[in-house]
Image (tube, rainbow, N blue to C red):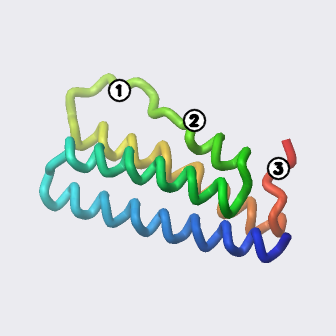
Amino acid sequence: MAQESGEAITVIQQQLKELEGIVEETMGTLNIVSGTERVTKWKTKTAALLTQSAGAQIGQDFARIQPGPSFTNDMVEEFTDLVECFRTPLLKLSKTLSQTGGSPGGG
């Protein structure tokens, strides 16, 4: 179980790194549409990796995350909100896995 937890934490850290890369490139080019598309593809890949490394339930939970409604006309702010809606749960999951040694919540 501890080995699975370690693998899941490694996957989470790698996916967070990839997300940061998308953010940096998107903010550098200010091509928010392309950045949003890349985040969507990243989310799908991340859900699959979480399913493999942390279990089906965790992968499904991540796949179901949807950004909340946006009330701004600021595309950059909307993009950063999108990123945060995925970054925050991954950080929480990583913290939970590292504290519990692999049993995230138990339901």
Residue at 16% across, 61% down: 28
Image quadrant assignment for residue 99: bottom right
Q: Which residue is mark 3?
A: 105
Please, is residue 52 above or below residue 82 in the view? below
The amino acid type found where label 1 is placed reads Ser
Residue 106, percent from left and from top: 86, 48
Mark pair 2, 1: CA separation: 18 Å
Q: Which residue is mark 1?
A: 70
Comparing 37 with 31, the one in front is 37
Q: Assign the N terminus to one quadrant of the image.
A: bottom right
* N-terminal label among 3 and 2: 2
- Disc 3 is placed on an element classified as loop
Tell me the mark number nearer the camera, choosing from 3 and 2.
Answer: 2
The amino acid type found where label 3 is placed reads Gly
Residue 22, percent from left and from top: 31, 60
Comparing 74 with 57, the one in front is 57
Residue at 40% across, 60% down: 19
Mark drawn on residue 33: none
* N-terminal label among 3 and 1: 1
Position of 59 with respect to 86 (left or right) is right
Comparing 36 with 79, the one in front is 36
Q: Residues within 10 Å of mark 1 (few under 14, many from 20)?
A: few
Q: Residues within 10 Å of mark 3 (few under 14, many from 20)?
A: few
Tell me the mark number nearer the camera, choosing from 2 and 1.
Answer: 2
Residue at 71% across, 59% down: 54
Please, is residue 107 above or below residue 47 in the view? above
Mark pair 3, 2: CA separation: 18 Å
The amino acid type found where label 2 is placed reads Arg
Q: Which residue is mark 2?
A: 64
